[in-house]
Image (cartoon, rainbow, N blue to C red):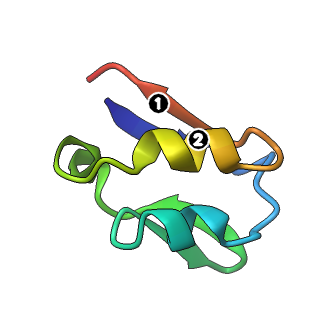
Amino acid sequence: MRPVVDEELCIGCGGCEDICPGIFNLVDDISRVVDPEGCDIQDCCEAAEENCPVGAISLVED
């Protein structure tokens, strides 16, 4: 699975970066995916998706 951030929905709260450091990073108050393959190694992407307060994170099939 690969994480995708809907930049139109993202409010820049930083929760995804707290949950999955190294995969998400805030840039100009918008979350960016900096390591799309990182979800294969770290088991935190589902938690980031579930905890996004505005539903801006989704996981897509590779």
Whether residue 6 is visible, yes or no, is no
Rounded to the nearest angstrom, the CA distance separating label 2 from label 1 is: 7 Å
2 and 1 marks in contact (CB < 8 Å): yes
For the N terminus, the image quarter is: top left
Q: Is residue 32 left or right of residue 33?
A: right
Give the crowd class for mark 1: few <14, some 14-19, many >=20 residues within 10 Å. some
The residue where tag 1 is placed is 59
Q: Position of residue 20 (x, y in %)?
A: 43, 63
Mark earlier in primary sequence (2, 1): 2
Q: Residue at x 70, y 43 (%)?
A: 56
Q: Secondary structure at mark 1?
A: strand
* Quarter of the figure with residue 16: bottom right
Extreme-left residue of the structure: 41
What's under tag 1, amino acid-wise? Leu
- Judging depth in this view, the residue of 41 and 12 nearest the camera is 41
Q: Which mark is residue 11?
A: none
Q: Residue at x 30, y 49 (%)?
A: 36
Q: Position of residue 51 (x, y in %)?
A: 68, 48
Q: Is residue 45 left or right of residue 13?
A: left
What's under tag 2, amino acid-wise? Glu
- Judging depth in this view, the residue of 57 and 45 nearest the camera is 45
Give the crowd class for mark 2: few <14, some 14-19, many >=20 residues within 10 Å. many
State whether residue 28 is above or below residue 62: below
Q: Residue at x 55, y 50 (%)?
A: 48
Q: Position of residue 45 (x, y in %)?
A: 43, 45
Mark 2 vs mark 1: in front: 2
Extreme-top residue of the structure: 61
State whether residue 30 is above or below residue 61: below
Q: Is residue 26 left or right of residue 42?
A: right
State whether residue 59 is above or below residue 41: above
Q: Residue at x 54, y 73 (%)?
A: 18
The residue where tag 2 is placed is 49
